[in-house]
Amino acid sequence: MVDLSSLIEQCGVKFYGVETQSLPSKTIYRIFITKDGGVNLEDCEKVSKLLSPIFDVEPPVGGDWILEVSSPGLERRLTSIENFANSINELVKITCKNNENLSGKILNVKDNEIILQTQNGETIINFNDIKKAKTYIEW
């Protein structure tokens, strides 16, 4: 298996995550990248050109597939502790496994804990207690 994170960093961006989407005739293998100041089309093109020949030899999924490289967007799912660490100072909505809903600003990430500034003050959440989370923008 290819170490996507190390390869992608060669292009001056960070690996954010991957998702697959099954279509009737093929699968979309979507890689998300980030960088300070935002991702542009040139960044996506660099990563795609780097990974395409590697994936031609060692496909990431079986069957017919298409590679897409993209920014995760302004409002995005947070699925790993690294996603939270890369989202410090951003607003987040979290649903815990006990169905408690929290929202606030990510202040810091230490080990497996997220420190969140909520309306009621600082709250520490263990990553393993999170059911789902996503960043959001206040308009």
Image (cartoon, rainbow, N blue to C red):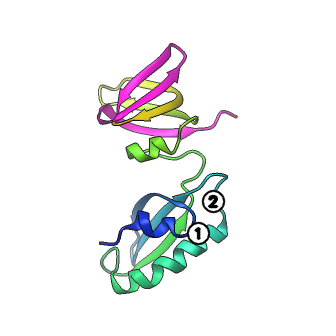
Above or below 30: residue 132? above
Q: Amino acid at mark 2?
A: Val
Of residues 42 and 135, the one nearer the viewer is: 42
Q: Could you tell me residue 131's position as x and y percent?
A: 34, 36
Question: Which quadrant would residue 133 be assigned to in this image?
Answer: top left
Instruction: From the image, tell me which residue sits under label 2.
Output: 39
Q: Are marks 1 and 2 in contact (CB under 8 Å)?
A: yes
User: What amino acid is found at the position of numbered circle 1 in the picture?
Assistant: Cys
Which residue appears at 47% of the width and 64% of the height? 31
On the rendered image, what quadrant is the C terminus found in?
A: top right
Residue 136 figure quarter? top right
Q: Is residue 33 magenta?
A: no
Instruction: Look at the picture and state if 119 lies above or below 19.
Output: above
Q: Which residues are magenta?
A: 112-138
Q: Residue at x 42, y 66 (%)?
A: 6
- Calculate the distance from the C-alpha at mark 1 to the C-alpha at mark 2: 7 Å
Vertical arrangement, residue 116 with respect to residue 12, above or below: above
Residue 131 in the figure: left or right of residue 52 = left
Q: Where does the image place residue 115, in percent across and percent down from the top left?
A: 45, 27
* Helix, strand or loop for disc 1: helix
Residue labelled with disc 1: 44
x, y (%) of residue 34? 56, 56
Identify the residue at image location x=51%, y=70%: 68
